[in-house]
Image (tube, rainbow, N blue to C red):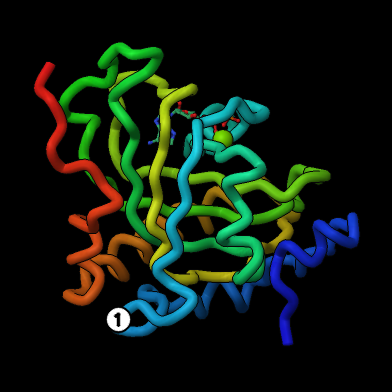
Amino acid sequence: MVEVAAQAVIKEERPTAPMRTETFRQTRPDIAGPDAPELPFPIVLSGTVQYGFGRGGKDLGCPTANLPDESITPMSSVTQTGVYYGYAQISPEKNGQFVLSEKDRGVMPMVMSLGWNPFYKNERLTAEIHLMHDFDSDFYGHEMKALVLGYIRPELDYTSREGLVEDIETDKRVALKSLARLAYEKFKSDPIFDTTQPKL
Ligand code: ADP
Ligand code: MG
């Protein structure tokens, strides 16, 4: 059995990820997971968006909102590392003020990476979420809620940045297609999300 991500944390060792191969690239399916979410999904995650190393946006053209360590447990205790799909929402409020523009307040489709980022040789397990939406501003310090609904692929290591960028682009397409199925769409209005936000 594949061990869950939290076991590697307890053992204080960073597992090595397999190299991404050309065969993997050529045979990636364009939809992931079963037709309806199956256990352990849906998994609810929430926490304040943290500063990371600033690499996702600048280096890879894919900003990822990082969750604090303690918010990862509901996920890492039941799943392996890898890339997942689901929905996420950013709270409009920061320090008692409503600062997120109205178009940025919705529930957005997302791709999430749970892992050790082997390409960057991270020492810590991180959970990072890319929301598929063009935000007007950064939202560090805002509360983020996420509903993880399915698994896309294992975490891999790369010999080039281009290979990683290519896989991330594929992950986004796979996530959107996977979420477009009827049994997944209803989670967009799940009660964990706020659909009654005050106007600016
Ligand atoms: P860091 O290493 O600090 O997480 P990133 O380059 O990954 O830096 O950028 C992440 C930040 O970019 C998020 O914390 C958020 O404030 C902002 N951001 C803007 N648009 C998005 C988006 N679509 N998805 C995730 N984060 C976004
Ligand atoms: Mg990030």
Query: How many tags in the picture?
Result: 1
Would residue 181 be found to the left or right of residue 51 on screen? left
Looking at the picture, does residue 187 appear above or below residue 39? above
Can you tell which quarter of the image residue 136 is in? top left
Can you tell which quarter of the image residue 19 is in? bottom right
In the image, what residue occupies the spot 84% across and 59% down? 10
In the image, what residue occupies the spot 56% across and 59% down? 74
Identity of the amino acid at label 1? Answer: Ala
Given residues 136 and 164, the one toward you in this image is 136
According to the picture, the residue beneath numbered tag 1 turns out to be 36
At which x and y percent is residue 51? Answer: 60, 25
Looking at the picture, does residue 172 appear above or below residue 30? above
Return the residue found at the far bottom.
Answer: 1
Looking at the picture, does residue 65 appear above or below residue 15? above
At which x and y percent is residue 35? Answer: 29, 83
Q: Residues within 10 Å of mark 1 (few under 14, many from 20)?
A: some
In the image, what residue occupies the spot 40% across and 81% down? 38
At which x and y percent is residue 166? Answer: 52, 54
Query: Quarter holding the C terminus?
Result: top left
Looking at the picture, does residue 181 appear above or below residue 161? below
In the image, what residue occupies the spot 30% across and 81% down? 36
Can you tell which quarter of the image residue 11 is in? bottom right
Given residues 17 and 191, the one toward you in this image is 191
Query: Quarter holding the N terminus?
Result: bottom right
Which structural element holds mark 1? loop
